[in-house]
Image (cartoon, grey):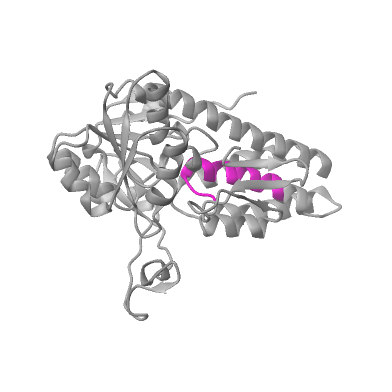
Amino acid sequence: MQTIDWDDDRDCVVMVDQTRLPAEYTTDHAETVDELVGSIEVLRVRGAPALGAAGAYGVALAARTVEAEEYATYEERVRAQAARVADARPTAVNLAREVDAVLEVLDSCESVPEARERTLEAAQRVANEDIRRNRQLGEHGAALLADGATVMTHCNAGALATVDWGTALGVVYSAQEAGKDVDVVANETRPLNQGSRITTVELMQRDVDVTLIPDNAAGLCLQEGRVDAVVVGADRVVLGGGERFGDQGVVFNKVGTYKHAVVAARHDVPFVVAAPHATVDTERDADEVAIEERDPAELREVYGSQNAPADVPVYNPAFDRTPMELVDYLVTETGVYEPPLDRADFAPPVPEA
C-alpha cells in the first residue's frame, strides 16, 4: 500500500505505522484530527513529502468531522482544525504548504457536502502528484549514478518518507530500474534509528543490497573510499541563508546531514540532495526556520530502558542546516541543479484553472 492514503470504507486516513518497524509492518487509522496530529508528532507518519500528504488529508478529515449548520461557521472550524495539523511539526515545509493548498478549496465552496467532497478530491490530487514527482525526480537523479556505485544515505528518504517511491532512495530505485547495479550504505540515524529501522527494511524488500553502519562510521567509510556518492533527502530547502549563511541557500534535513556533507567534501565525494520542488521554500531564509527539538527521553532512554541519568540536560534537535556550498547537486522532478541556485528556477507554480 501507499505510505499514507484515504480509507474509503472507514472514511478516514490510513497510514503505515512506522513506529512499529522493523518488528511489524502494520497500518494505523486516524479517524479524527486529534489522532492524525498525534500520529504526526510521534512519527507514525514522517518524511517531508509524506507529511505534505498528511496535511492535505488532514484538511479533508477536518472537513468530514467538523459539524455546523451555517457554512461560514463550518469553514471557520475546519480552518482551526487544519491549523493544528499544520503546526504539528514546524521544520518540514510540505506539511503547512499542502494544508494551505487544500484549504484554498473552501473559498469556492458553498455548502458542507461540497466542501467535504472537494477537499478530499484535492487531498488525493496532492498524494497522486507526490508519486508523479518522485518518479520523475528518481529518473533525473539516477543519471548521476554510475553502474556499480555505492550510495551512502542518512535517515529515511524512501517510499516510506513519501506517498510512494521516495526521494533519495527513489534515485536508487530508478537507477536499479534502469539496469544499474547500485548498493547502499545506510547510517543508523540515532536517536530514533530511522536508517536501521526503516531504510534497511525498505531496501531489502526491494532487493537492493544494503549495509548498515553506526552513524559515527560514516567518516571512516568515506575516508576508505567505500562510497561513490552521498544522497539524502530534505525537509526544507531555503534560498537565502540569513545572517549565518548570507546569500547561499541552506538545506534543512535530519540532524547529522551537515556532518556527512562536510566529510564528503573533504574526500571529494559528491553530495546530492533529492527533494521535490514543493520542499523548496522561496519565501523564508534560514533564520526564519525553526528547528524542531524532540523529547529528551529519546536520548535518556532506549526502547524504554534507561540510557543516561534521568536529570541530565539534553539537546535533541531533529534537523540541522547544511549550507548549499557543500551540495554538489539538488535533484527535483524538473531536473538536476548545481548550486548556486537561481531563485527564478523555483518560483511557485501557477495554479491550474
Residue sitting nearer the eye, 6 or 72: 6
Let me know if residue 46 is in the magenta part: yes
Q: Quadrant of residue 317?
A: bottom left
> Left of 301 or right of it: where is 266?
left
Q: Is residue 255 above or below residue 277?
A: below
Q: Is residue 320 above or below residue 335?
A: below
- Dominant SS of magenta comes to helix
- From the image, which quarter does the C terminus lie in? top right
Q: Is residue 66 above or below residue 248?
A: below
Name the outermost residue toward the top. Answer: 178
Residue under the point 58% across and 41% down: 53
Residue sitting nearer the eye, 179 or 189: 179
Residue 239: x percent and y percent? 34, 38
Region of the chain picked out in magenta, as a range: 45-61
> Left of 332 or right of it: where is 163?
right
Residue 275: x percent and y percent? 41, 35
